[in-house]
Amino acid sequence: MNYSKQREVVLDALKENVIHPTAEKLYSIIQIEYPQVSKATLYRNLAQLAEAGIIKKIDGLEPSSHFDHNTHPHYHFICEKCGRVYDVSCDVAKNVAEKAEEETGFKITSHEIVFKGLCKDCQK
Amino acid sequence: MNYSKQREVVLDALKENVIHPTAEKLYSIIQIEYPQVSKATLYRNLAQLAEAGIIKKIDGLEPSSHFDHNTHPHYHFICEKCGRVYDVSCDVAKNVAEKAEEETGFKITSHEIVFKGLCKDCQK
DNA sequence: TTTAAAATGAGAATGATTATCAAGTTGAGG
DNA sequence: CCTCAACTTGATAATCATTCTCATTTTAAA
């Protein structure tokens, strides 16, 4: 990855805004001081920085939502090779919500765990 | 919620396809037998069914991704009132990935937990 | 029945993100 | 310090998922 002023600006903006901004939010922040930085450059750099492990992209099953007829509480696993979505029993993380409530003092009404990796078929 | 044939079709299609389909996937499945069901109706019904708790929408922080300069492993909490995103220490779910690997036999390379509820400020 | 609320289809509109491409920048090797 | 290929950029078009609009149709309670 070569140096570029724009990438530096993007990374600095993210460092200075610990509020987990969206790309759009970040764009408007950057625009104030560096109006010449284009949206394409911003998205490109966010992707590159995330790819390099310098920043982290927080998301679920984007870009599109998945639907589930099973409303019993359970988690999900997405295979990064075949893209299939599997169910994971909620036994793997007992009392997470309770522990998180304790730790944070927030009122937790729901939570979601998404695992990613290789399913059995794709490990072969 | 009044009865409608289209909603019945959507729900049946979801029941018969335990593969956690996306809305688009579901649309193409439904099109085969019920080509008159429009995309708007599908999306509307998915939202309504999810709202009523009959089905479940699986997603993260949609519709837009958030970015985080902190790459240390940690989870997130989104306040449903103010929309702010907070960090949650990974202590709340020790060894989840290991337990999930054991249970599923899948190779897990990453996972993400998103809690939702009310933050301290918004509980007041 | 009557009728108001709920639901629909078709397509336009939106929002987030990615792709395209010509032009400018970077940096390793000579 | 040149050169040149690889890397980046800005501007904008394109795409993808989803939501909105609105005129028409259906549902169900009185």
Image (cartoon, coloured by chain):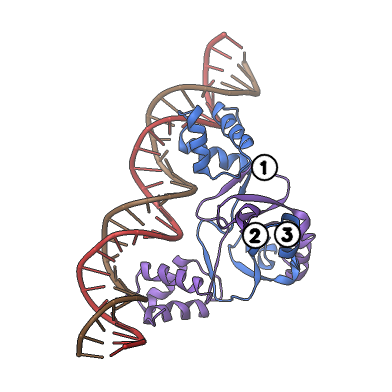
Chain colours: A blue, B purple, C brown, D red
> In terms of secondary structure, where does tag 3 sit?
helix
Q: Amino acid at mark 3?
A: Ala
Quadrant location of residue A53?
A: top right
> In terms of secondary structure, where does tag 1 sit?
loop
The residue indicated by pointer 1 is A53
- Is residue A115 shown left or right of residue C1? right
Q: Which label's residue is closer to the chain start, 3 or 1?
A: 1
C5 w.r.t. A11: above or below: below
Q: Amino acid at mark 1?
A: Gly
The residue indicated by pointer 2 is B115
Asked if the residue under mark 3 is in contact with the one under mark 2, i.e. CB atoms within 8 Å, the reply is yes
Residue A3 image point, x, y percent: 60, 27
Q: Residue at x 79, y 59 (%)?
A: B94
Query: Can you tell which mark lies on residue A36?
Result: none
In the depicted view, which residue is nearer to us: B2 or B36?
Answer: B2
The residue indicated by pointer 3 is A100
Q: Return the chain for callout 2.
A: B
> In terms of secondary structure, where does tag 2 sit?
strand
- Is residue B2 shown left or right of residue B100? left
Q: Return the chain for callout 3.
A: A
